[in-house]
Image (cartoon, coloured by chain):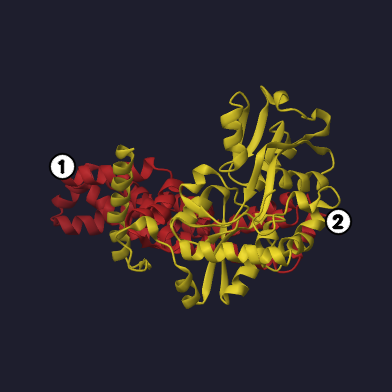
Chain colours: A yellow, B red
Amino acid sequence: MKNKNILIKFITLTVAALLMIGGLAGCGTETASSEGQTANAATSFRTLDEIKESGKIVIGVFSDKAPFGYVDENGDYQGYDVYFAERIAKDLGVEIEYVSTDPASRVEYAATGKVDIILANFTVTEERAEQVDFALPYMKVKLGVVSPDNALITDVEQLNGKELIVVKGTTAETYFEKNYPEVTLQKYDEYADAYNALLDGRGDAFSTDNTEVFAWAIQNPGFTVGIDALGNADTIAPAVGKGNTTLLDWLNDEIEALGEEEFFHADYAATLASVYGDAANPDNLVVEGGIVD
Amino acid sequence: MQDSGISVLFMGSNFLRLLEGLWVTLRISLIAVILSIPLGILFGMFMTLKNPISKAVSRVYLEFIRIMPQLVLLFIAYFGVTRAFGWNLSADASAIIVFVLWGTAEMGDLVRGALISIPKHQYDSASALGMTKIQTFIYVVVPQTMRRLIPLTINLTTRMIKTTSLVVLIGMTEVLKVGKQIIDANRFEYPTAALWIYGVIFLLYFLACWPISILAKKLEKRWR
């Protein structure tokens, strides 16, 4: 562990030294020191007051994962997570700046304070909780496995010796690595690539959150969700930088308050209902007031 | 045609967004190329020095940049620097820095190769004509090196334009990411949009790199 730290320091130092050359060459290096806490880089986040003062909150969302976070034809962010993000900004009284994240970079974004909140279908796990702080959940999911009808996989055991497609950095990847090491995983960086791989038949099945595969299977005839609930129920929650208690407390209060007006059911109706149709019951997905039953 | 995926391209501001994405790609790569070429030439000359220390330094730099995938360098410049030192570089700045570092290293090695490929008799003939070392360099070595460098530089430039698609990792939406966003937003209604969008992206990349190729051909002819 110590060696690894030294290596990271060395590499960053080398890069930093080389940055100077870049700086001299006149390219704009925007070095903004983070709220007087430069000594401890691990805590480079903005507190609630700083966000309010700046008049802008930076929220990391997916930009290619409909219906949770995507960009519509006019270039505007839309989806279940975005609906919530808009409400957060409204209640804080600030403008909103979206940052498009990928599954694998979400932890880094929150941990380095590059975004104030990650609202990108972020499943709560122990490993992630060591790096970021999760607020109360606003959704719950299990894993689902979708496969072609002509070779439908209805049991995990059927996956032995087959190629399962997963997206890097998702819960599905860690779940299968930990519990089913004998399943061969085919890993992709982005959802769009993973779905294309399944459509092309490069893999036998694709696993990710059941919400996601349900929506996709409805729209893609010839594919069915053979396994609809695998593993423990995972919760999806907003994440903030480790130790950012002011923002975390505000978010928790906000989620509890929103529970009273059934905000997330309204969110579901506005963004998810049309995609899932009758296939899913909103009470199985939506979490109100942060209470998972 | 009304059901075909190509209609996705003309919905809302989709095509404009693709062009904006292309601009991000071109901006990053062209700034990086413009900075890397002079820096690379200096670095290449530095590499040909017969000093063990300068040789070791340039060797380490070149090998480090060449061996590290650009993806890793981007990650270090964007997240690693913030984690280790608390410096908050913008995504633009990190991308440009990484691509300049990479471009300088590669360009430097190309320049070194071109310089040492000038045969020894050229230097001997120049000194026989009474030229000083500086005159030899300016009138004999540089013109020949330039001509050798053009195709190599064009190669590097087009490679850089294509490699900038990695900047999605640090949150920049360049042309390929915009394409993926469009495909994803329409994957329910227009599952066939993917091929069309990728086709258009291919065309955009081609239109971006083709003029550079033409320019290179012209220069090569002129400097013959």
Question: Number of labelled discs?
Answer: 2
Q: Is residue B142 visible?
A: no
Nearer-the-camera pick, B96 or B118:
B96
Location of residue A133 with respect to A267 vertically, above or below: above
Q: Chain of mark 2?
A: B
The image quadrant that residue B223 belongs to is bottom left
What amino acid type is highlighted by mark number 1? Pro
Residue at the spot 72% in from the left edge and 47% down from the top edge: A212
Give the label, 2 or 1, closer to the camera: 2
What amino acid type is highlighted by mark number 2? Asp
Location of residue A7 with respect to B212 vertically, above or below: above
Q: Residue A277's x, y, as percent?
A: 84, 53
The image quadrant that residue A227 belongs to is top right
* Residue at which label 2 appears: B3
The kind of secondary structure element at disc 1 is helix
Q: Sequence-wise, which precedes: disc 2 or disc 1?
A: 2
Marker disc for residue A257: none
Location of residue B142 with respect to A30 vertically, above or below: above
The kind of secondary structure element at disc 2 is loop
* Residue at which label 1 appears: B52
A143 relative to B83 in the view: left or right: right
Nearer-the-camera pick, B67 or A186:
A186
Residue at the spot 70% in from the left edge and 59% down from the top edge: A80
Q: Residue A176's x, y, as percent?
A: 61, 32
Q: Is residue B146 visible?
A: yes
Q: Residue B96's x, y, as percent?
A: 42, 60
Nearer-the-camera pick, B90 or B153:
B90
